[in-house]
Image (cartoon, rainbow, N blue to C red):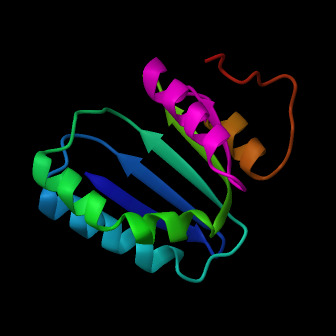
Amino acid sequence: MLIVRKPSANRLDIELSAVLDADMMAAGLDDLFDKSKDIGGGVMMYRILSFSMPTGGALAVEMMRLPQLFDLIGHFDRCAVLSDIAWIRTAAEVEGALIPGLQIKTFDLENVAAAENWLANIEDDDEPNVPV
């Protein structure tokens, strides 16, 4: 499932779990685009609870919407990625280094408070970032 919530005017929370098929991907992306359209300088918390490779149909849906996804990136300044899967955190950090204007920082799933502080631009040295 790809669940998108908008807890405040300038924030989206996204949760990914299970295998995405074409219908789930389309519905999730439609929701993501709709909820982000009025956001500028926003923040995003992206929780990846489990990861399985999406179906071929889901990947095709995502590829067809790449222009919208690139536009969406411009709505956000920071993205906290929470996952207990090390390679996902590494991939997110690399992605953050490649996307101008978007800071991505990764955290273990249990480090929600540290991620919330980082999104709020509150640095807390007592809450270490998870090494990648």
Q: Position of residue 21 (x, y in %)?
A: 13, 52
Residue 96 seen by the camera? yes
Residue drawn 52% across the image and 74% down it: 36
Residue drawn 76% across the image and 21% down it: 128
Q: Position of residue 62 (x, y in %)?
A: 28, 59
* Quadrant showing the C terminus: top right
Q: Position of residue 80 (x, y in %)?
A: 62, 43
Give the vertical position of 55 relative to 53 (above or below).
Answer: below
Q: Quadrant of residue 123?
A: top right
Say left or right for 104 vs 33.
right
Q: Quadrant of residue 125?
A: top right
Q: Quadrant of residue 98?
A: top right
Say left or right for 21 vs 92.
left
Residue drawn 47% across the image and 76% down it: 35
Query: Which residues lie in the magenta part?
Result: 86-111
Instruction: Give the residue furthest to the bottom.
Output: 38
Residue 21 falls inside the magenta stretch:
no
Say left or right for 125 vs 95.
right
Q: Position of residue 60 (x, y in %)?
A: 19, 57
Say left or right for 29 vs 40.
left
Residue 108 falls inside the magenta stretch:
yes
Q: How many marks?
A: 0
| 63 and 40: which is toward the camera | 63
Residue 109 seen by the camera? no
